Amino acid sequence: MYSVPKLADWSAAALDAAVRELLSALESEAAQVASEAEWRMFRDRWLARKNGMLTQVNDLWLKAAPAEAKREVGRRVNELKPLVEQAVEAAQARAHGAGAKSRLDAERVDVTLPGVQRPLGAEHPVIRTMNEICGVFRAMGYSVAEGPEIESDYYNFEALNFPAEHPARDTQDTIFLAGQEAKPARERLLLRTHTSPVQIRTMQRQKPPVRVVIPGKIHRHDAPDASHSPMFHQVEGLAVDTGITFSDLKGTLDHAMKALFGSSVKTRFQPSFFPFTEPSAEVAFSCIFCGGKGCRTCKQSGWIELLGCGMVDPNVFEFVRENGYDPAKVSGFAFGMGVDRVAMLKYGIDDIQLLFQGDVRFLEQFG
Ligand code: 2NL
């Protein structure tokens, strides 16, 4: 690599030769600068105050020159300085350009490649069924209400005519929250076992007439198997007005079953019992798989049981009497159905667990 020579011959010809040699070294070193880091080393080698090439030229050529040569040496040394500075500046511009180009090359994006695929989500079959059921009742003028999943004993039992210690409570397989013993019994919290508490809340908020459906999650202390889950879904409905009769109940639910399962289904009402309705009934519709002849799904009966319903018990109205629900003046009907059962029938699902395991291979079939 080039280094600044000491001079012995101070003639004009010898000085010119030394200058040419230095400039050619400058030019070839400048040509090799290819990056920001190399440029910095090049700049320091030539311009550093301490030991840079120009400093050495000053020391070895100008300061060392005999008095008679000082003028000629000085002129040449002065001309060198701007040349070196120009070469350094030009090399920087080139190094910078080269760096930017290689970065652009590395980061180049091919906009013609296919994009990142984002799979579309699909509505869960339970939610879809819930919306469909609510839609059938909305079309008949019902509104939709929701409420808390953690409820008090009062709303889940007391106000629905399940008195404390009544055996009907046992049928609910309730999951209770721990640490509630310090509270009065009616304030103790539990996971709601039906969405009926929201109907009580609706009657507290709204004077009759009322027509409302309540979709939601409910909980029962049940061991999971193909037809049981400790968490499942329900849609309940309530209609209260003057002069509501059991015929209104039958006509409404008969229409709802036809809207959900096809206009050719028949409905069957059989007497039953619920604490909050009197009289009460179980509703079945004619089997959509065998047309009523008998098959595996309807257990050879020709009927599929789906709903519980009845006329609202006057004892329930007593809890909201002050808000216009005098049982001597108004009457109403109520019903409840399991959404998961409906979804399984509609989509031919034989295991309720599939609905809640979150397996994408199952869920993506509903896109
Ligand atoms: C079933 C039975 C039913 C009700 C729910 C209800 C609510 C109020 C007053 C009266 Cl606030 N009744 N709800 C009535 C009868 C049956 O559900 O088997 N569900 C799956």
Image (cartoon, rainbow, N blue to C red):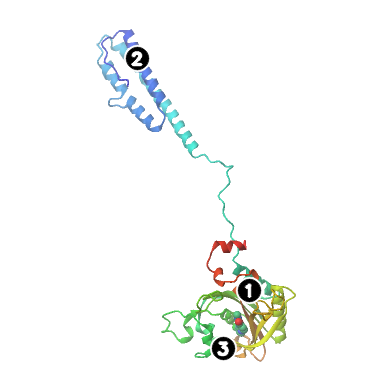
Residue 144, image x and y in percent?
63, 74
Residue at position x 29%, y 22% from top?
Answer: 55
Residue at position x 64%, y 69% from top?
Answer: 347
- What residue does disc 3 label? 161
The image's mark for residue 19 is 2
Residue 82 visible? The answer is no
In the image, residue 217 sits, relative to residue 80, either above or below, namely below
Residue 80 visible? The answer is yes
Residue 188 or residue 300, whichever sits in front: 300
Amino acid carrying mark 1 in the image: Val
Q: Is residue 338 left or right of residue 24?
A: right
Residue 251 or residue 341, whichever sits in front: 341
Residue 116, image x and y in percent?
55, 49
- What residue does disc 1 label? 342
Dot 1 crowding, Cα within 10 Å, few <14, some 14–19, many 20+: many
Q: CA distance from mark 1 to mark 3?
A: 28 Å
The image's mark for residue 125 is none
In the image, residue 98 sits, relative to residue 258, either above or below, namely above
Amino acid carrying mark 3 in the image: Asn
In this view, the mark in front (3 or 2): 3
In this view, the mark in front (2 or 1): 1
In this view, the mark in front (1 or 3): 1
Label 1 sits on a secondary structure element that is helix
Label 3 sits on a secondary structure element that is loop
Q: Is residue 131 left or right of residue 57?
A: right
Residue 126, image x and y in percent?
60, 70
Amino acid carrying mark 2 in the image: Val
